[in-house]
Amino acid sequence: LDRIAEVDGEVNAFLHVNTEEALAVAAEVDALRAGGLAGELHALAGVPIAIKDLIVTIGQPTTAGSKMLEGWMSPYDATVISRIREARMPMLGKTNLDEFAMGSSTEHSAYGPTRNPWDLDRIPGGSGGGSAAAVAAYEAPLALGTDTGGSIRQPAAVTGSVGVKPTYGGVSRYGAIAMASSLDQIGPVSRTVLDSALLHEVIGGHDPADSTSLTDPLGALAEAARSADVAGLRIGVVRELQGEGYDAGVQQRFDESLQLLRGAGAEIVEVSCPNFRYALGAYYLIMPSEASSNLAKFDGVRYGLRVLPEDGPMTIERVMGATRAAGFGDEVKRRIILGTYALSAGYYDAYYGSAQKVRTLVQRDFEAAFAQADVLVSPTAPTTAFRLGEKLDDPLAMYLNDVATIPANLAGVPGISVPGGLADGLPVGIQFLAPAREDVRLYRAGAALE
Ligand code: GLN
């Protein structure tokens, strides 16, 4: 909390600091320890955590980075929050994000951008820039993010942190404000691979409140992170996720990482996923389509903001129009319009239908690649952290930063980003991808690079 007070004026990672409750939980843990009950405490009891402000919490506001939800308090906890409470982890507060998690730089937050602690003139990635910056600035040892198209992994990469997108269904989405329900996944952000594994074990596992939640056990994630054993592991370099469009410095650190993995006994093979080149295009149709449906509930009646038209008739449509005009930012409006268009009669087959076919092709590419390799590897993002404002007026350039992270969401497979050294003084992330339900492999491979 002292560290937050010291640096967050500059970093702006937090939208809300949960001082009283965090101290109360910490005191409770101390009391249990003093009472000789340390053995009954979870391994992470007393370890503070920051929560992306897309995840609903009792007792703290949830804004989703939007004016639409300013001052709104959730009447219930997300499942991951209940599990954090059970483990007695003090929640430090809620972290900044691109509005409704739409963005790659946290500049689309209605509450001002978060800055990258490595260079305050640069972006911390997005949409979960607040969680990653909080970890990188030593304001929190752990954080939660959500990853629909890279929003955990890309911010982790550009802030020198570890970030994990679990297998789709491996962590409950109950209480994560939905962006694109078939792609969304909550996951950990941390400084080490083991820390992420420990947190993943707290938040993961079956939840009847999420209809897509898997019933499989999670696997021994922390044990895998501790072993860091890649001897004999076949690691597939995805030909299409490197080279053109990737910074030379990023490519260099990536090549060195392959050397390190080879040195640790891994077998490096090359795999090809030819349909990955269409993944970004498919994502930017499927994601806005689902978002346009999910965001329909922000109607000026049920949640948060209500703006009344200045004059004329006071109809529901006009209240909704005035509320949405004032409550949503440009990027959210852009995506609602894109999604509504892609789903509309006459365009459905051409856009949404085609995108779903591409999604299947991406899944098949993964299946073929995983027949040749146990895990896949690539740079997490094509560039290091760019400057604030650099891509703000060019949505396409911003979208391109997600080129390496999006295929995993389309296929539901898990991914991790681990620090891979610096290029021109800025962190580079290395991404591992594993088959669905094989999150253990991510932790083994990721830990081998630390
Ligand atoms: N940059 C991606 C987007 O803007 C990431 C979204 C996410 O993972 N929440 O859609």
Image: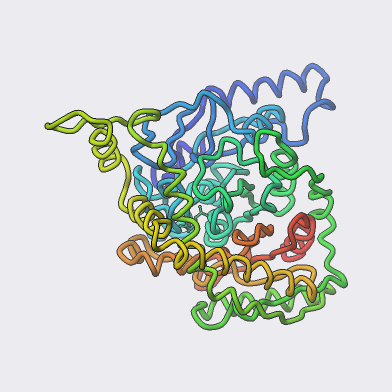
Q: Residue at x 53, y 57 (%)?
A: 155
Q: Say how many tags the image has.
A: 0
User: In front: 227, or 9?
Assistant: 227
Please determine whether, in this image, residue 13 is positioned above or below residue 235.
above
The extreme left residue here reads 311
Please determine whether, in this image, residue 85 is positioned above or below residue 150.
above
Check the picture and name the quadrant holding the C terminus: bottom right
The extreme right residue here reads 232
Q: Position of residue 185 (x, y in %)?
A: 61, 48
Please determine whether, in this image, residue 13 is positioned above or below residue 117.
above
Q: Position of residue 41 (x, y in %)?
A: 78, 28
Q: Position of residue 332 (x, y in %)?
A: 37, 50
Q: Residue at x 33, y 67 (%)?
A: 394
Q: Residue at x 33, y 61 (%)?
A: 392
User: In front: 290, or 132?
Assistant: 290
Q: Residue at x 40, y 30 (%)?
A: 303
Q: For residue 321, which quarter of the picture?
A: top left
Q: For residue 381, which quarter of the picture?
A: bottom right
Q: Colour scheme used in the picture? A: rainbow
User: In front: 434, or 386?
Assistant: 434
Q: Position of residue 328 (x, y in %)?
A: 32, 44
Q: Is 235 positioned to the left or the right of 305 in the image? A: right
Q: For residue 45, which quarter of the picture?
A: top right
Q: Is 332 positioned to the left or the right of 94 in the image? A: left
